[in-house]
Amino acid sequence: MDAQLLALVLDEVIPPTADGRLPGAGALGAGAIVQHAASATPGLEPLLTQGLAALQDIARRSDSGGFAALSHSARVEALQELEKASPMLLPTLLTFACISYYSNEQVLTALNGSARPPHPQGYEMEEDDLALLDPVRARGKIYREC
Amino acid sequence: MAEQTVDVLIIGAGASGAAIAWSLADTRMQIVCLEQGDWVPTEAYPGLHANWELRQAGDFALSPNMRGRSEDYPVNDSDSPISVSNFNGVGGATVLYAGHFPRFHPSDFRVRTLDGVADDWPIDYQRLEPYYALNDQMTGVAGLAGDPAYPPKELPMPPVRLGKLGRTMAAGFNKLGWHWWPSDSAIVTEEYEGRAPCINAGTCMAGCPQGAKGSSDVTYWPAAMRAGVELRTRCRVREITLGANGMADGVIYYDADGVERRQKAEVIVLACNGIGTPRILLNSRSPQFPDGLANRSGLVGKNLMFHPYATVAAIFEDPLEGYKGPFGCSLWSQEFYETDASRGYVRGFTFELTRGFAPVFGSLWAVPHGRLPWGDAHHAAFAGLHDRVLGLAGICEDLPELSNCVTLDEHLTDSNGIPAPKINYRLGENSRKMMDFAVARATEVAKAAGARDVIVESPFKPAGWHLMGTARMGTDPERSVVNEWGRCHDVRNVFIVDGSIFVTSAGLNPTSTIQALALYIADTMKNNLANLFD
């Protein structure tokens, strides 16, 4: 599998954020998890290899340099064309991209302010006002006697 | 060791095995428990590690087929719209459960009399009530007294916090005038019996390294072992054997090295829940029981009940702080619990609220629902979902049906070569109508609470964690497997104490009732020791 091409595609699947705070999924290394999954999952390797080859063919119709030579908008158009021909490929790549991207320390820090695991620190929660239950109490018993 | 006969042999160290081991320990009998899994060391829990979410799809997955540990047995559930979830280790499925701890209602024991379906239980709420209370104390249950959906009961400590997410939905229930109440939760909210309180980390369903969640490895087992019960881990029972007198005389099991061993016993207690228990009985064939031990009724493995989960994910405009607090426990509603024939079905369901998804699961949930695209729109779509989704599950009562069953797979085996269980299950007509009603009501209350959108999953496929009915309790040996105190009709020194003896499923989480039953059966055994087999 062409790792460079895969990284470029993943950068379109989850692109860099508009504010530049986060790179795309390819730049953050999502390709590694895709390659690992492809080696461990029957049928995934050919889907990806054939899909990427088809994408290059589509791209080369616009530029002999292939997908890497295309502009962002042209890459998106190429992927949209590929999506019509191979509808499973993009959702599959998006799934793996999400697994990688949303477990990445840099992304988690941007989203949550921290990438720490939930334990042992946990989270503070404020006390509840159980007067919220007043209308429930006022209605009275609702179970069946028997 | 192999030739020594112990007084009581318990198979399975989960919720029910732990409870009965602790209760029987005061008899000073020699009690051994064989558990096919192991202890989970605190440091192994995913919640302590940055990759905790990913491990919920790996070595801490709910599905044994996905987890694939050597101590797991595979389950062929390809012929079921609901997949089996469990955990094989000390504590059993309580290691990964949410900790919801509702009791059955009094009406749940009288289903035939009240609603004309299924069967009444041979015991009632009043019989179990003291054991519910004892179990609450042993487990450390948090909750708020005064729930109008229940007869009066006391709870050992204050409820878990609702948080912003819980209060948001509570306002929706109030707007519609519907019942809701803080959940009874097997989660300690203050220091309790040496256990530290919940810190609201939200990783309950990947295990609780804090020890706040009342899994039976931290509740009953320490006390049972202090009282002298021997717990042997990594010991997988293949079959129960019969002696010349027609009584069970022991088991054959495999130890951690895969060596076949035998353990003799005077009394055998099955505590492997609704799949594991019939599996062992069906694997225990003999000339006297060619269709499996204690199966003269033909009901071992039959009447499998899950709880079909009718779920709605509600999406809100504003953040819900859903990452704070126990994942599955905040509030429940039993507005639609008791039968109302005008709804087009009988029996009912409990609504339970779940907190939000963390980023990986949130994204993986959104992709197949078409809510998270690839490309330039991805980040805005993610931002519109992150910490803005909560779950509302209608836990629907499943009625027993003979065709829903556990059998032995002809080809699939576990790592010791023991035939694995196969599930045949279809949703009944009553369940389908109830689920449709539950989805409509969940949508209604979510909108009342301010949700901008909902996504429906009904049934929620991974929710096969409540496993009941496959060795049902009753007074008639032709129509049940065990009597009214868990003793097999056909083999009087074999007892069953887990969810398989449920006559009906009720519309709520079963662990509180499973453990109350185990304590009740233990007490009955102790009161009848002189004539236990008569």
Image: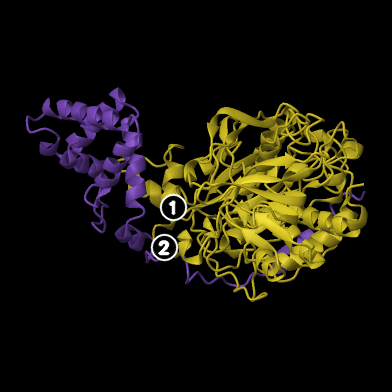
Determine the CA span between mark 2 and mark 1. 9 Å
Residue B483 screen position, x and y as percent: 87, 43
Which chain is purple in the rendering? A
Q: Which residue is mark 1?
A: B55
Residue A55 screen position, x and y as percent: 20, 29
Q: Say whether residue B364 is visible.
A: yes
Check disc 2 and give the amino acid type. His
Chain letter, disc 2 residue:
B
Tags 2 and 1 both on a single chain: yes
Residue A61 screen position, x and y as percent: 12, 25
Q: Which residue is mark 2?
A: B49
Is the C-beta separation of discs 2 and 1 under 8 Å? yes
Give the residue at the far left of this rendering: A64
Task: State the SS at label 1.
Answer: helix
Q: Which image quadrant: the N terminus of chain A?
A: top left
Residue A117 screen position, x and y as percent: 42, 64
- Crowding at dot 2, Cα within 10 Å, few <14 / some 14-19 / many 20+, comes out as some
Chain letter, disc 1 residue:
B
Q: Say whether residue B144 is visible.
A: no
- Crowding at dot 1, Cα within 10 Å, few <14 / some 14-19 / many 20+, comes out as some
Out of B7 and B527, give the one closest to the viewer: B7
Q: Residue at x 83, y 54 (%)?
A: B521
Q: Colour of chain B?
A: yellow
Task: State the SS at label 2.
Answer: loop
Vertical comparison of A54 with B315: above or below: above
Q: Residue at x 26, y 27 (%)?
A: A82
